[in-house]
Structure formats: C-alpha cells, structure tokens
Amino acid sequence: MYNKEYFRKQLIDMLNPIEKYYDGGNVKYSQHSTWYEDKSADMEAFARPLWGLVPFWAGGGSDDRFKELYIKGIADGTDENSDGYWGVCHERDQRFVEMASLAYGILFTPDIIWEPLSDITKDNLEKWLNMINDHAVCDSNWIFFRILVNIALKSIGRKYSEERLEKDLNRIDEFYLGNGWYKDGEHGQRDYYIAFAFHFYGLVYAMKSGDEKRSEEYKKRAFEFAKTFIYWFDEDGEAVPYGRSLTYRFAQCAFWSACIMADIRPFPIDVMKGIIVRNLDNWIYKKDIFDHSGILTVGYDYPDLLMSEVYNAHGSPYWSLKAYAFLMLPDNHEFWTAEASPMPKLEKTKVIEEAEMIISRRNGKSVLYPAGNNEAFACGQIVPKYLKFAYSSHFGFNVMKSNTSVEESGCDNMLVFDVDGQIMYRRHFNGYEIVDNKLIIKWSPFMGIDVVTTVIPTENGHIREHEINSEYDCIAYDCGFAVAARDIDGAVSHGGDSAEVKNGFQCCSVYSQTNGTGFVVNPSANTNLRYRKTLIPAAKYEIKKGNNKLITVINDHLEEK
C-alpha cells in the first residue's frame, strides 16, 4: 500500500488547492500579518511547497503545472522591474529562510529549477540569492540557509562566498553539544529544530557539498541523534507536542526522511518507514488541519492562531512538506516495498542530558520532562511551549489567553500562583540538575516567590515536590494534564484532596499529599493544541508567607481508544 505512487498522490493532493493562487513569484490566499512584510509572506507561500515538489521531481514525479509555475515565478520574483519582484533583502530577512528551498531545488533538481531559466533570469536569481551573503542572518539554524545557498550557487558555477561558507560551517559546530544534539542558537532551545533543521540541512550538505570530512561528521551526528529522538514518537504516530513551530506538524518526521534520503540507518529501514507512515497518516487523515478548500492552516490539530508564533504566515505550514524528502528515492529502492514496522522496544525512562530532559515511556506513549531554560526567548506563547513540567504525546497542552484567571492561564502541567487576582506562572529559570532519574528545577514566577521543584517519573505518571519561599499569602494551583472534553460522555470528580477527569480515551487524576484540595479547571475553549475543549484536574493550595512544602501526585492513566 505505502508505495511511491501512494505518497506522490498524497503530496499532490495537498498542493492542488493552492495552484490557483499562484501570482508569478507569490502565492496569495488567506492573509494575516506576521513580524515580517506581507510581500515576504507571499514569497514564502510560493517557496515552501518546493520542500515537497523538489523530491517529487527528483524521484521522477511528473506534474508540468507546477514546473511551469516555478519557472515563471522565479523569473518574476527576481526581476527588479517586475511588480512581483521579491525585493531587496535586509538584515535577518525572512526571505533568507525561503532561499533555502530554492537552494534545495538547485541542488537536487537543477534540470527544473535552474536549467530552463533564461540567461537573464539566471543572472537575476544569482544576484538575488547572493544578498544573503551581504547581510546578517539570525545566529541559529538560519546559518544553514546561507550554507545551502552557497553550496547551491557553487554547484552551478555561479558566484558564492567561500569565506562565508567556512565561517558558517564553523559556527554550526559551535552549537553542537554531543550525542547528536545541537542547541538552536544562544537562547539554547532543544526542540524539533534540531531534527528538521540542523540534521535535515546537515544531511543535504553531506549529499551535495563534496566536503567528505564534514559530511561524514554530519552523518555520524544524525545517527547518534536518532537513538534519543525516537523517544519523541509514540506507537500510534503521534509525536510529543513541545516547543515552537508546531504548526509545521508532520515536519516532525522529516528527520527520518532525511536519514533515508542520505542512506543513514540508525534503525532498520522498515522501522523508520513505520515512523514516517504513521506520523503522516495521523496528521493528514485523522486531524482537522485543512480548511474547507483543502489548504493547510496555522494551528496544530485544528486551525488556531492563538498558539502561533510571530513568524507564522499563511504559507508557513507548508514547511511540513520537508517530510517528503524520501520521494527522491529511485523506484527500485527497498523503502517502497518495506513494511511499515512497529516501534522498537525502548527504555521506560531515558535521560537526555544534552537536551536537558527526561523522557518516560509507558504503554507506547511518550512523556517529556524538560528543565525549561527558555525564559529569554520570545516569539509567541514560549512559556507554555517550553516551561511546563510535562509534555505528552497522548495529551495536548494549553496556551495562555490571559493571566487574569486560572481558566485563561494555560495552567496544565504547571504550578501557578494567584496573587491579588493575577495568575503568575513559571517564568525565571535559576538552574536544574538530574539526579537518579529525578529532575530538580529552580525557578521563580516573579520577584518574591522562589520555587524548587523535583519531578519524579513513576509507573503511572509523576510526582512533583515543591519547596516554595514566598513573600506573600496567596493561592497556588498544581495542575495535571488537560483532558479532552469534546461534548462527549466523560466523568469529572473532585473533592477532598484529589481531582480526576476522564473520557473514553484519556484520564488524569491529581492527588495532594500536603493539605491541598481537589479542583477542576475549566479552561477557555480553543486554548489546547489538540482539543478545542479541555478540563484540567488540579490541587489547590493556600500558600503562606515563608517556607511551604507541597507534594502532588499526577497519574495520567492511558486509556484505550
């Protein structure tokens, strides 16, 4: 079933709805604003489908409609005298991100993206791409965009910057932490960008640069990374929702596609195919990620701008098409006839020191317990995306709507404080350590309250031990997972020292061992990434001035669907 034609059709079916919106080198449909110019957003929507089309073409796929659109669009977008000109770039320009997909096309399908262009358009494209060498890029995974542009220009004998290329490659090495893990810039994120950016681009470089020494190093790093990244995926195709850029959805599995593309085998090919197949099918056929016309929306399980970042424009979600890198494999490759095998047996608890987290594996599901050191990085809902105590492949997490009530605070898997009617949440990071599979985090919601939290994974969930030094009398809520409440039969109970919420496939209970009372939070609709309505079991505590010690037990029973 999962042969080449299956995936080709899957890809083209996703792209067909946007065909009518191409306007030269821009694609315009629904429009909402981002931090960058609207012109850049339209250019982004033109460029991002190339992440899927390039491997489609490289693997022998034929669709003349899109070939013609891109030949015409590149000519239009790079012509300074055209109304559709992509424009002159500036420092840290969003268009530098989109240059990477054009470089991808030049490297793998020059017969479509480069050779059919007129001599004038070739000169214009060379000039436009070289603007990335004249400006700063963000000091993060963005450095790889300039690397790809330079090796692409070099591959076709055009002007490029060898000096920039060498400096950028050395800078990438400075982000490397060991065991396959990078940090994404000086803010230190360890999230999906390590998989679908650093390693994806590193393997493209390994395939096309001719730099044997670095290429082998990038392959080795990807091989090592796979051994822990596999823990982020459960047996049903879900990956843990954690960190930013979650609207890129099935880009979650792009790392495995890149490994197969570059012939890296950290696991048998049937196991990697299984991860890809389940993730893609789960996203495309089981979730509400398309609008009524078939266009990918900004959101996660459903359209939702509240969870988005400042850089999510209308075309941004098509970055997810990087998952289709495997389409460039030849027709006789073993991938096409391999079974989509189940996940291998994994350890119940895995400490990933380089990623500053513990991962628990139970009943085929994954729960991630991060240290959460991303306080200085702000681009949209960063606190709920990085600073909760737990993230699960089985439960989505809630984002914040306001801090004026606990219902709007996105409080699942957080200890939040109600001080004078304002909800204060985990914010300032003061250090952490992992000792005997326990995660100890020092943090503060704001000046006057300091907390040391010890997170202890258990057979049924986890325990949180909090030591709180407060200058205020206030209320605190220690909250469990957000359970789907989709106008279906379910059960809610609270009272005494415990609270529980359950439905037909999820259950979370919270129990206080230190004089807390059971409480159920009814969050605002559309604040959870996966479910439009949720309920959150919690323990409610009275915090006194001085030293307070709390112990809360969270059991996330994994019910059968």
Image: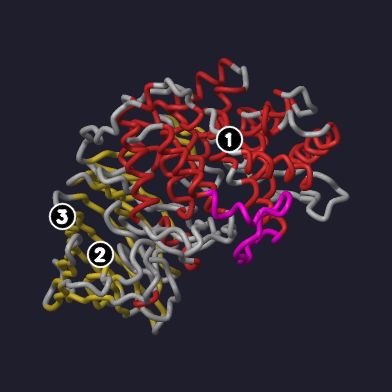
Per the rendered image, the range of residues in magenta is 15-38
As for residue 372 lying within the magenta part, the answer is: no
Give the spatial CA distance, label 2 vs label 3.
Answer: 19 Å
Element type where label 3 sits in the image: loop
Closest to the camera, between mark 3 and mark 1, is 1
Residue 367 percent coordinates (x, y): 27, 50
Look at label 3 and name its amino acid.
Glu
Residue 281 percent coordinates (x, y): 35, 46
Q: Nearer the viewer, residue 549 or 362?
A: 362
Closest to the camera, between mark 2 and mark 3, is 3
Q: Is residue 395 left or right of residue 200?
A: left
Element type where label 2 sits in the image: loop
Give the spatial CA distance, label 2 vs label 1.
Answer: 43 Å
Q: Which disc, if any, is residue 560?
A: 3
Q: Which disc, if any, is residue 480?
A: 2
Q: Which residue is mark 1?
A: 54
Give the spatial CA distance, label 3 vs label 1.
Answer: 40 Å
Q: Residues within 10 Å of mark 3 (few under 14, many from 20)?
A: few
Name the residue at the right extreme.
Answer: 81
